Amino acid sequence: MDALGRKLLDAWKANGRRWEDALREWDTEGIEVFNPALYAADLYERFLERYAPARNPVFTLGLNPGPYGMAQTGIPFTDCRTAAAILEIDLPLPGRAPAELVKRLRRENGSWRGTYERSSLGIYRALKLAWGDVGRAYRNWYVVNACPLLFLKASDYKNMTPADGPLKKLAGFQELRVAALKAVAEILEPRAVVCLGKDVSGALGPDSEAIVGKERVIHYPHPARAVPDAWAAGLAKELKRLGLAAIAAIALSSSASAQHEHHRMNHGAAHAREASGTSWQPDDTPMAGWHGSAGDWSLMGHGVFFGVYDHQGGPRGASLWHGIDWGMLMASRPLAGGTLKLRAMATLEPWSVGREGYPLLLQSGEAVDGRPLHDRQHPHDAFMELAASYERPLASGLKWHVYGGPVGEPALGPTAFPHRASAASDPAAPLGHHWQDSSHIAFGVVTAGLSDENRRLEASWFNGREPDDNRANFDFYRMDSFSVRASMNPDSASSYQVSYGHMESPEILDPHESLHRLTASASRWSSGLATTFAIGWNLHSHGPASPSALVEADWSVDRANVLFGRVEAIAKGGHDLDVSDPRPFAVGSLSGGYRRVLGDFKGVEFSLGGRGSLGWIENGLRADYGTRAPWGVMAFIRLAPAP
């Protein structure tokens, strides 16, 4: 940490001690008070070591900590998830929050996590719009948390702000806030001040004007009370109007050293967008995982496990206890002005599911013992990904990237279903998997592409052959297939893609047939609701084209209750379903379920859930299935990283 950062840390701690002294004189009956400026000072020190500001930054004044943000991380406007995903600061969970705070949050909300820091959604979006990346932003932006105390009503643990009546009556409250502002202003000599919220504008606005001049003070709504997209765009516009902010394209195309800083500081900001292979999902998608570092390497672990009892009814149904899982490790570091990432993913499904897969009526795809699998979902190969990627900026805000390895995912289709937020709670694979995203495990793939802030165009060369029924080995064949994909994230809540792929000899049982695949998809994440709409067409070289469509959703109603569902329609040939009539049949399914979050232990979230499905088929399949509405149920336990 440089000398300026050390001075700021000392001022931070001194401010915390002043408020602690004042607390001894105040009557705070009925109010629980916590002081993260003291108990989380080590976490704030980690923040300053990486993001210490330069002199003359823009001051940002907020109210006081929230229970899920600074009260746990020591970093204003920042919860544990944001610190890990955007700032790449590995924090203990649940931060440094005192045990009594964690206990009460768990009691009141079902989890210590409760929710993310709402204000962080707008804050980090504004920083990205104004300066291009977090590292550059925090050189120019410093949060002065004049009041570092968290106030909670003892009766219901609701958050209180300095605007609340009981706090206004505390002797010397306002004087302490003004003193904190002036102490930091003497160190950094700010260029401008942003007052967030009416309370801050009224209480500290006049003193801010005395420091920087009236024309350099921005009065702006608090982000928790505004739509994040509009709020962030408006604040960035205000900063640019005063000449305080850089344009993102300039920030990205500056000198090589600035590019290095961009990737060192901000490659974690892309984690939320990154999904399977090189596919994109909405930027706002929550990214849960275990984070750490080793030297210049940033490390992340992620995964999920479903323990499932599966019963599918009718003459083609069956029952099975099985496990569905995958685990991923990712390491990234700056390299030669860009970012290198290594990815490894594996599963126990060859053993926890078995060679013939788990029962799932109307499912089709791949083969076992020389015969096609039908009404069962095949297990994934033990090695799901062993790949690396490298990305580096070009001029004018463009970036180029390469991705590849012995096992990886070509640029074809939407985010693979095991990694889609909209399918996170559903243990079953979509019935249209082999029409939309079945190429997500290819034994041999190379991808290259160009992207800017919101768009990406890429092409892949890969092995398009389906894996054999030995799920523990590597199935290397000629890399004679190719694909192209265009992706776009027009805003932080949405992601779109269209793609085309030619797969040479994909079917083990019919090696002389090739396949053209077209896909398009749209995904969205907003206020706990993740949705995906996807369509896919398979055009066989020796048969008719067959379409598919899917709509799925995963909705976190609150912190403990999740609803999920899926609607599908596909044209499957008789050979897909292993019936005597070879013509295409229209089949579909409506499925839905519920997941209850029981809590978390040492960073692992435990859930119980259930799923039911009801299919529909043409009359020509009724004799095989015994009904035109085949059904199935699943009960499961789910383990995943705590958000």
Image (cartoon, rainbow, N blue to C red):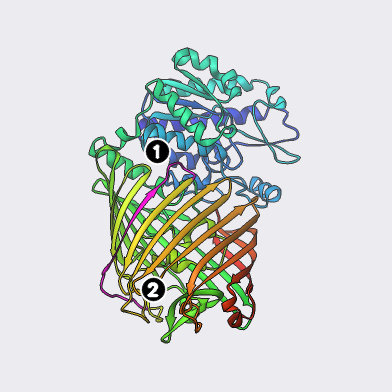
Q: Dot 1 lies on which element?
A: helix
Quarter of the image with the N terminus in it: top left
Q: Are marks 2 and 1 in contact (CB under 8 Å)?
A: no
Amino acid type, label 1? Val
Q: Dot 2 lies on which element?
A: loop
Q: Residue at x 35, y 59 (%)?
A: 500
Q: Please state the extent of the stretch shown in magenta in the rendering.
A: 473-493
Q: Would you say 120 lies left or right of 369 here?
A: right
Other-residue count near label 1 (Cα within 10 Å), few / some / many at <14 / 14–19 / ≥20: many
Separation of disc 2 and disc 1 at Cα? 52 Å
Q: Give the overall secondary structure of the magenta segment.
A: loop
> Disc 1 designates what residue?
134
65 or 638: which is nearer to us? 638
Q: Residue at x 49, y 44 (%)?
A: 493
Is residue 77 visible from the viewing direction of this image?
no
Q: Would you say 371 lies left or right of 567 here?
A: left
In the image, is residue 191 part of the stretch drawn in magenta? no
Looking at the rendering, which quadrant does residue 461 occupy? Answer: bottom left
Q: Residue at x 53, y 56 (%)?
A: 422
292 or 628: which is nearer to us? 628
Above/below status of 313 relative to 387: below
Q: Would you say 382 lies left or right of 100 here?
A: left
Is residue 267 visible from the viewing direction of this image?
yes
> Disc 2 designates what residue?
543
